[in-house]
Amino acid sequence: MRERWASTLTSGGSRGAEPPDHDWTSPGGTDTVGDVKGFTSEAGRVRRLGAFAAAGLLLALTGCSENAPQDTMEPAGPVAQKILDLSEPVFLVAGIVFVLIMGLVTVAVIKFRERPDDTGPEPEQIHGNTKLEVGWTLIPALILFAIAIPTIATIFDLSQKPDNALNVTVVGHQFWWEYRYDDLGITSANELNIPAGVPVELTLESIDVIHSYWIPPLAGKTDVIPGRTNHMSFEADEPGTFLGQCTEFCGLSHANMRAVAIAHDPADFDAWVAAQRATPSAAAAGSQAAEGLTTFNAKGCAGCHTVAGVSQGKVGPDLTHLYSRDTFAGSMFDLTEDNLRRWLEDPPGVKPGSVMPDLGLTDEEITQLIAYLETLQ
Ligand code: CUA
């Protein structure tokens, strides 16, 4: 045995040569070539099974994570619930088909495999079997037909525009979301604020490339395409914060383009609306914040960002009420002074592909700007 492996290795594995007789069913042994023979021995089989089981267990355990805010199996509203109600029976059918087919293939592979003592003639060679072919055409067709009925019903159901919905226009930008509540006269960014228990109708548009809007606990994903208007609707059953993300590759910071939906009690939502409509109070003359406003205008920030009463830039997020939000830069960062400083020092450095350039701000200018931004409540 040892000689054979050695000669195979040194001769580069002469493919054409007839393999020497060997016993594939040999039950391992004490031979020092045990590791190589282990591929076929009983011990090797156990080891392989163990490896498969460990891989399967690992895969299963990753599904048990407690911290899974983007879990479609935990719907937080009627739209996500309907999607789950459709997926579960489809998954069940697919699971049964998978186990059945893979089971039959496994049985066939093991039971009818070639054995070393197979010296008999080849099995009968056949071509065509009408009964089988009709069967394996008809059965899948019937299964697909059965699945199509609830699928189509759900698609039509979910495409209905809800009555008395809150309308929000969602605009995808590289790499952040703009939210326009045209009926309410509000523009915000990154965090979608909605009332719980009220249907929301989203109008989806893109300013640059294709994005996709997805808040898994609330609804399925919908592409956001330049030159085209798409719609989706959902509703949050209870107040809460729901995480999502852009799910269409849209550039370097696609993975940093997150989405957050915050559902409020209706009364809290009304308070949020009132606060968003108010104009932030002006920075006191001579204060650091007032210096920051000067820097905001001098360094070109005003050319890209809107602050009500100050500037009308449209390239970046509306900052009028920046500090009413918890996150910034596509919800990539929590809104803290430290994070703002890191961001202002070099935006593309912390968020690759960021449209906001490195303005070469000094530490003092950054301090002033942060003081100003903090007044934008
Ligand atoms: Cu926007 Cu990916």
Image (cartoon, rainbow, N blue to C red):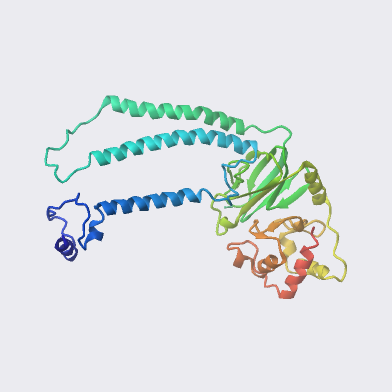
The C terminus, quarter of image: bottom right
* Furthest-front residue in this view: 30
Q: Is residue 312 visible?
A: no
Residue displayed at 29% across by 38% down: 107
Q: Position of residue 294 (x, y in %)?
A: 80, 69
Res 15 → quadrant: bottom left
Q: Nearer the viewer, residue 288 or 136?
A: 136
Q: Position of residue 123 (x, y in %)?
A: 17, 35
Please give left or right for residue 64 compared with residue 130 in the image.
Answer: right
Residue displayed at 64% across by 46% down: 205
Please give left or right for residue 270 compared with residue 81 in the image.
Answer: right
Q: Is residue 173 above or below residue 95?
A: below
Q: Position of residue 65 (x, y in %)?
A: 54, 51
Q: Position of residue 265 (x, y in %)?
A: 76, 43
Q: Nearer the viewer, residue 297 or 164?
A: 164
Q: Is residue 256 above or below residue 117?
A: below
Q: Is residue 236 visible?
A: yes
